[in-house]
Amino acid sequence: MPTMDRRQFLTAVAAGTAGHLAGRCARGAASKAGRPDTSRMNILFFDNEDFTAEAVGCYGNPIVKTPHLDHLAATGVRFDRAYIQAPCCNPSRTSFCTSLRPETTGVYGNGDAMNEHLPDWAVSLAEVLERKDVYTANIGKLYHRTSWAEKQLRPFDRLEFCERPTGYKGVTKGYQVPPGMPPNPARFTYSPDPEVEKHLLAVRKELREKAEGLPPLERWKVMRRLGWAISKRCVGDSGKVEEREGDGRKARLAAQMLREFAQTGKQFFLSVGFSRPHTPLIAPKQYVDMYDPADMPAPKAPPKEDRGIPRFAKGVADVDAGHGAAKLVASYYACASFVDAQVGLVLDALEQAGLADNTIVIFFGDHGFHLGEHGCWSKYTLFEQTTRVPLIVRVPGAAGNGQVCRRIVELVDLVPTLADFWNIPVPERMEGTSFAPLTADPARPWKKAAFTAHHTGKARSVRTERYRYTEWQRDNAVELYDLQEDPLEQVNRADDPALAGVRAEHARLLKAGWKAALPPSADP
């Protein structure tokens, strides 16, 4: 359990006596119209790795099968314009768990140790929620590494499927597959595709030669491309039954914990972090069998149709996705369907435990993922496929349920939103805005823009309702896309005289930053 000193500190926050952390109501919470009293509701929080909105049926994909997420969206609010603050796991998770942007956290990449960069005054998700007398539990990955987030994980009452921080005094019970579950049919086996193998051998030779003699950082970047190339071989049948997969076990533990919560009657926050569809793209056979690579269409946004896009804007993982792309996409969809089934299992348990009518459900991805667009695979870009994520929120009794919200929200808004649901004051320096009002009125006026940073802050992007504008320190490159006319961002119009005014306007907005884009009811 957290120490008394921590609780005293956070009590001071609430009382407004902690100086720069003076408590206040969450931004955006000015109007409660159409919103039920959520202060006594539970919160079930699904945070998922590498989950693109392009691989969810309700977001418009006619091939992928995600019936449970589709149902959740039909009974909640589907946010169509939810954006991350950084295009890879560590900085994105640091941001949404602290409600601070990369420019403040100092965390821009997966190699940045969070605990060495965060300001001393930063307060995280569990530290905010523990101010309320609730039971907090986390299953799976929440932060990139436990060793970098010990302070942020210690307040949780229970931690499962993750390392425990030093000095942790909470509960870890573990999970055992119940007796009688079928054994795994086989070990994962890799069946090489000759075309892919030939391509990978060529890539390996090219990259190893290119890496010779480079400084350590540049060599690492080159070799990371090689790692992504090799990881593309690990696709298909995992050789495990669903109940013995890591995510399958997490889902069943979550279901078990929900039944326990129903018995105790204790208000709870439960975070469940699923690993798929992060690579390797392997899943139980029944999900792999759902998708025939021969039925997969060619990747969108073919590189040959890109115009004026800087080469480095396509990231370091731009290994030619044309080689074996169909099998990769089919395997990604298999993983998405597998996760969807695990979400469905947990939601069924929520219903069966009698908790569904009193539990807020939130589902989102920590960042997007390229599926061959622009010739890219994975993340590490500032295109829409990486920066936009699925976000579905169901608040029992909310007026907006069953609707689609096309207003811009950001993952940095998550902690203020949770605090708003539970009437918890949040620290003044948090940089997110509660989007809880949008669950009642999804069409109300809201943020002007979302902001994403990349490459140690050397690339910054702003997304408004119609345009994306990006500035790079490298070569002073600029990108401007009209997503109404060019939704796949294939024509860079930064130098188009017809959009000179738009470019200037977005340059000013990017320089002014997030405070210039706040919704009308959330002015600081």
Image (cartoon, rainbow, N blue to C red):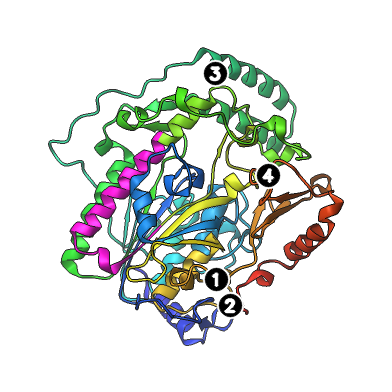
Is the Cβ of the residue at disc 2 closer than 8 Å to that at disc 4?
no
Report the side of 218 relative to 380 (left or right).
Answer: right
The three-letter amino acid code for the residue at tag 1 is Thr
Q: Earlier in the sequence, mark 4 or mark 3?
A: 3
User: Magenta: predominant secondary structure element?
Assistant: helix
Residue 128: x and y in percent read 44, 71
The three-letter amino acid code for the residue at tag 3 is Val
Residue 522 is tagged as: 2
Start-end of magenta stretch: 334-362
Report the side of 429 relative to 347 (left or right).
Answer: right
For the residues marked 2 and 4, what is the alpha-carbon distance in whole angstroms?
A: 31 Å
Q: Which residue is mark 3?
A: 196
Few, some or many C-alpha atoms within 10 Å of disc 4 (few <14, some 14-19, many ≥20)?
A: many
For the residues marked 2 and 1, what is the alpha-carbon distance in whole angstroms?
A: 7 Å
Q: Which residue is mark 1?
A: 433
What residue sits 60% from the left and 73% below the top?
Answer: 519
Is the Cβ of the residue at disc 2 closer than 8 Å to that at disc 1?
yes
Residue lying farthest to the right in this orientation? 497
